[in-house]
Amino acid sequence: MPHRRVRITADAVNVTATLNDSVTAGLVWDALPFEAPAGTWGDEIYFTIPVEADEEQAVEMVEMGAVAYWPPGSALCLFFGLTPMSRGDEIRPASAVNVLGSVDDDPTILKQVNPGDTIIVEAI
């Protein structure tokens, strides 16, 4: 399967990410492009997307730079550091997420995104 890469833009912030071959990642890919206002929760950006999916090998902890889908909120989540749920240096979502891939660039650039900024996700 060819790599599925996306561009994620919010004002001057621009990163790329590579999606995996999970069913949920395929649903996200098929829904592109989309945009939504950003929410932040610690060092996580999340926003509602036009995808509904159940848990798929959902995990309670993610790696730095993870791109994930949060089923309860139909939200795409970008992790670039600790969240209010983190313990020590663990990166913990609010609840289990489906990991869809990872940011290709330095994910800490996402710290520049403010709540309410419009996030655009498109295929590249």
Image (cartoon, helix red, strand yellow):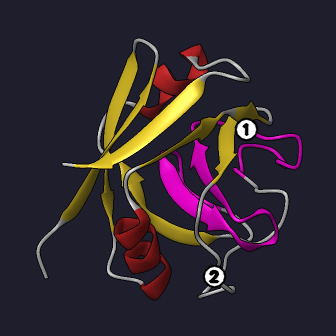
Q: Distance between the residues labelled 1 and 2?
A: 25 Å
Q: In which quarter of the image is residue 78?
A: top right
In the rendered image, which residue does mark 1 sit on?
82
Mark seen at residue 53: 2
Give the residue at x 52% y 26%.
Answer: 110
What's under tag 2, amino acid-wise? Ala
The residue under the point 84% across, 57% down is: 94
Across and down, in percent, residue 1 comes to 13, 82
**Which mark is first along the chain, 2 or 1?**
2
- Frontmost of labels 1 and 2 is 2
Magenta stretch holds residue 76: yes
Q: Residue 95 in the image: x percent, y percent? A: 83, 66
Task: Provide residue 58's location: percent of width, then percent of height.
Answer: 66, 80
Compared with residue 56, is residue 28 higher up or lower down, i.e. above or below?
Answer: above
Residue drawn where x is 80% and y is 36% of the image: 41
Expressed as whole percent of the image width and height from the top left, the position of residue 39 reads 74, 34
Magenta stretch: give its range.
62-91
Q: Does the magenta stretch include residue 84?
A: yes
